[in-house]
Image (cartoon, rainbow, N blue to C red):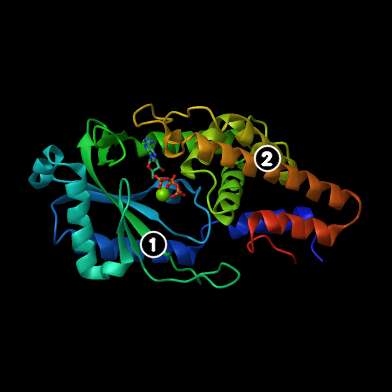
Amino acid sequence: MINVADAFSKFRSRLELTNKEQEDASRRHKEIRDYLRTKFDIDRDFLTGSYKRWTKTKPLKDVDILCVLGEKESHRRDEPPADLLKEFEDALVAKYGRSNVSRQRRSVTVDFGVKPNADEDTDGKVMSFDVVPAFNKSKHYEIPDTSNPNGWTETDPEIHYQKAVVAQDNYDRQWKGIVRMAKKWNAHREKPVKPSFLIEVMALELLVPPFGGDFRYELKGLFASLADRIHEAWPDPAGLGPPVSDGMDNTARDTAKQELLSASNAAAVAIQLERTGKNGDALRAWRDLFGPLFPLS
Ligand SMILES: Nc1ncnc2c1ncn2[C@@H]1O[C@H](COP(=O)(O)OP(=O)(O)OP(=O)(O)O)[C@@H](O)[C@H]1O
Ligand SMILES: [Mg+2]
């Protein structure tokens, strides 16, 4: 049987992007790009969000592609943001089918119909993309945001990217791995924390260097401090968009807090089981927290 420390190392590498996944993401990127360029004037487009920052969890879904619109589309900035999303939605429905395309607050999701197996493996396939139309706004971007009263959100993915790079460097290069694990817990628990980007934003402040050297205690501590501060307002780290914490009301935050506290308690129990020589029970306790990607052997 594997020991818990090795199980965590294996878990961490299972949450890394594989070459096959990156190839599939690039193939889908090209396919969507080539198609959308026949429908809209697009200046440039690129993969962004947690995929680009290496903080995405598995199975790989909702890879963000930002499509920066050109001059011919500038009139759309004066029209309602929902109209722009609808135009993108209609275009993508024509290619991928009604049942595979859905509109979100800031993007249009295209589902590729990939189903993970019981081990949450997709054989290197990306499940879905989030297509985000955008306008240039000085050195950053403006994207539709149907939940923001003014209809648009300013965003600077480059600043988010750089902050993650610095955090990773300051944390003995383990910060992203820990963020992916915490996001895996969230996805496995059906997302008590919304959006999951909030976990990454909070981790920028809550994971105080240096790395303690032990994923067990890092995770236990992170769950506890996320619980402790989940009711606070968490601004966009680039200082441009609305608070990242605006996706939950007070009731949702209460629920998230309870879930996070029980995760921290479950981690403490798992650590105790291991200390008393119950390795198999400890592994199963961690798997209950993270799901099938956490190895038992
Ligand atoms: N409130 C906000 N203000 C400004 N930019 C934001 C805000 N929320 C999200 N973003 C940017 O949009 C990107 C995509 O958002 P999304 O919710 O998909 O998060 P994510 O980091 O990609 O996480 P996930 O792994 O859940 O996809 C974020 O990575 C961030 O760069
Ligand atoms: Mg995303």
Residue at left 60%, top 31%? 206
* Badge 2: residue crowd in 10 Å (few <14, some 14–19, many ≥20): some
Q: How far apart are labels 2 and 1 at the CA level?
A: 31 Å
Q: Which residue is mark 2?
A: 261
Q: Quadrant of residue 255?
A: top right
Furthest residue in direction right, as rendered: 276
Mark 1, Cα crowd under 10 Å, few <14 / some 14-19 / many 20+, is many
Amino acid found under the numbered disc labelled 2? Leu
Residue that appears at 72% across and 54% down: 286
Residue 92 is marked as none
Q: Residue at x 68, y 45 (%)?
A: 263
- Tally of marks: 2
Q: Which residue is mark 1?
A: 128
Of residues 253 and 209, the one drawn nearer to the viewer in this rendering: 253
Q: Three-letter amino acid code at disc 1?
A: Ser
Q: In front of the other: label 2 or label 1?
A: 2
Q: Earlier in the sequence, mark 2 or mark 1?
A: 1
| Residue 29 sits above or below residue 158 on the image | below
Quadrant hosting residue 71: top left
Which is more toward the observer, 145 or 42? 145
